[in-house]
Amino acid sequence: MQRPLPISAAPSVGPFVLMDHFGPVPAPSRKLEAHPHSGIEVMTYLIEGANEHTDSLGNVGQIESGGAQWMRAGRGILHAERNLLDRATTMHGLQIWAKLPIEEQDGPPQYSAFQSEQMVEWKTSGATVRLLSGKMDGRSGPMDLSSPAFMAHVYVDAEATFEFVFPNTAHEYAFYVVQAAEPLVVDDKARIGHGDMIRFETGAQKAILSNPTSQRAQIFILGGEPILTSLHFSGGFVLDSEASIEKAYTRYHTGEMGRLDGVPF
């Protein structure tokens, strides 16, 4: 597994504070055991595979390749995920965390499953775009995050160039290379290979990405309104102060976040 976000040079991109890239690997049979979250939205986007979500609200949701699990943790929720080995034997995808605005960190938790056919997909010059969240080329993605945000999975054609015009120049953006046989070229100067991320500060107008290889490449684009408040991490909690983290742990241990699979004991 790779974790391109956070890194010291980029603790966040827009509201996004964590990205894990897993696979492609044979699907493990083990379950991601029940654990708590607070203060964030959690997205699991499956490029390939099938999994099931359960949580302390009683929700159960299943997705397959191209789908996404979405959970707004709010003041606290427990969830677990397991791979559906009868539907897919390979797992490949991204888990992404976005920090909630302060005014929504104490709100009620929510959950939705988005199937592959709900994603907005189209062919553009040099690439195929799958839009998850935000707006691009007059289209809107199905996932409505709490902060202004953008997420897209882009397949860049072999020996092709893809031009991305930033939807909002007041926002930050980043390209993450999900898969590439050789390094891709950004704006005729920067080279980014498999597992690399390049970040664009506010004010940028557009970026031109070239794939010089004979194989199609994949990138994931993140973006959104920059975080202007403090960031405090502890386990699955991301909040604005250490005091808020302590309160979240109290809610978890007293069962206020609910219980799932015997957790908390």
Image (cartoon, helix red, strand yellow):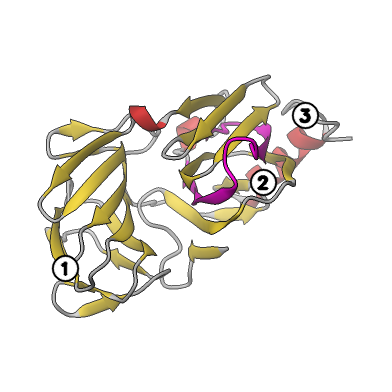
> Is residue 156 something that shows in the picture?
yes
In the image, residue 185 lies at what x, y percent?
Answer: 21, 74
The foreground one among 216 and 37 is 216
CA–CA distance in space, label 3 to label 2:
21 Å
| Residue with the mark numbered 3 | 260
Q: Main secondary structure of the magenta part?
A: strand
Q: Is residue 8 above or below residue 78?
A: below
Query: Which label is found at residue 159?
Result: 1
Query: Which label is found at residue 245?
Result: 2
Q: Is residue 228 above or below residue 263?
A: below
CA–CA distance in space, label 2 to label 1:
48 Å
Residue at 58 percent across and 33 percent down: it is: 73
Residue 194 occupies quadrant:
bottom left
Comparing labels 1 and 3, the label whose residue is closer to the camera: 1
Residue at 27 percent across and 66 percent down: it is: 215
Task: Specify which label sits upstream in the sequence, 1 or 3.
Answer: 1
CA–CA distance in space, label 1 to label 3:
49 Å
- Inspect the magenta stretch and tell me whether residue 105 lies in it: no
Task: Specify which label sits upstream in the sequence, 3 or 2.
Answer: 2
In the image, 231: left or right of 149?
Answer: right
In the image, 151: left or right of 257?
Answer: left
In the image, residue 245 lies at what x, y percent?
Answer: 67, 46
* Span highlighted in magenta in the image: 70-99
